Image (cartoon, rainbow, N blue to C red):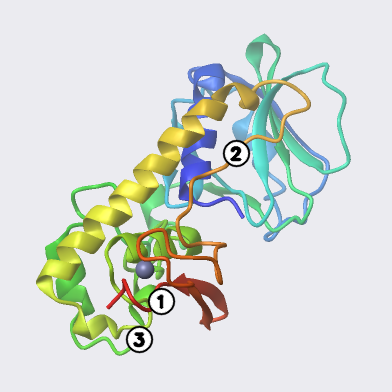
Amino acid sequence: MPELPEVETSRRGIEPHILGRKVKGLVVRYWQLRWPIPRDLPALLAGHKLQAVERRGKYLLFRFSHGCALIHLGMSGSVRIVNVSEPVAKHDHFDICFDAGKVLRYTDPRRFGSLLWAAGDVGEHKLIRHLGPEPLSDDFNWQYLYERSRKRKQSLKTFIMDSKLVVGVGNIYANEALFASSIKPIRFAGKLTKAQAKCLVENIKRVLAQAIEQGGTTLKDFVGGDGKPGYFAQELLVYGRGGQPCVRCDKLLKEIRIGQRTTVYCTRCQK
Ligand code: ZN
């Protein structure tokens, strides 16, 4: 599933090719994504200049003078830049065609993604409005995490993965940040100390920033017909390593489920 670093990498990969260009048309081959694509969107977009390509949480935001198009990649979606002559493949559900023959092509085998439109302030859109701060922004700091965690009885891992608290801390990054912070994922959020909050916030920022940096090596994959952009190998210390030795102490890592999500941790290093 594309996580925040993949979405940010996608944004950086496509932005230089389409920013400032005028939309010639929107070609929709499959309307029923997670939510139906608005039927009037082709008419709404045609002739308008793309003013900015931004990201909020896992949404890509395409800003125009009269509103904002939102793309979510769902479980298996990806975007790339192709030439207008590039043959269409099975799961290529829509194209936003720009001038100079540049096409933003959306591919999504499982069709859980979306393409929506916000006419007014996109920050007030129902899917955006309730999102917590960006993890790499100053609004996400240890004081914020500490205050919000008070009296919370859920596990710390579930707590930090809640997009109303902070966006973009997916399962991989929650596992990795908790290991790096030496904190047990099953600890009650309300038991978090100030020192742990500081450490955890630092590590969440670091693992996400590192993943975005690694994604930077794949930017060239966003242009052309055959690539599968947006996914990249990362160096992971606990995620996917249940039953293997801890890199710090050699004890075998424990794998459990928290809220149906695979959770891996070291019972010796994480308190
Ligand atoms: Zn260990």
Residue pictured at 43% horizontal, 72% vertical? 251
- Cα gap from disc 1 to disc 3, whole angstroms: 7 Å
Residue pictured at 38% horizontal, 41% vertical? 210
Residue pictured at 12% horizontal, 65% vertical? 143
Location of the C terminus (image quadrant): bottom left
Residue type for callout 2: Gly
Residue type for callout 1: Thr
What residue did someone put label 1 on? 158
Could you tell me residue 151's position as x and y percent?
Answer: 20, 88
Say few, some or many: other residues with alpha carbon within 10 Å of mark 3 (under 14 / 14 to 19 / 20 or more). some
Location of the N terminus (image quadrant): bottom right
What residue did someone put label 3 on? 154
What residue did someone put label 2 on? 230
Say few, some or many: other residues with alpha carbon within 10 Å of mark 1 (under 14 / 14 to 19 / 20 or more). some
Could you tell me residue 146's position as x and y percent?
Answer: 16, 72
- Cα gap from disc 2 to disc 1, whole angstroms: 25 Å
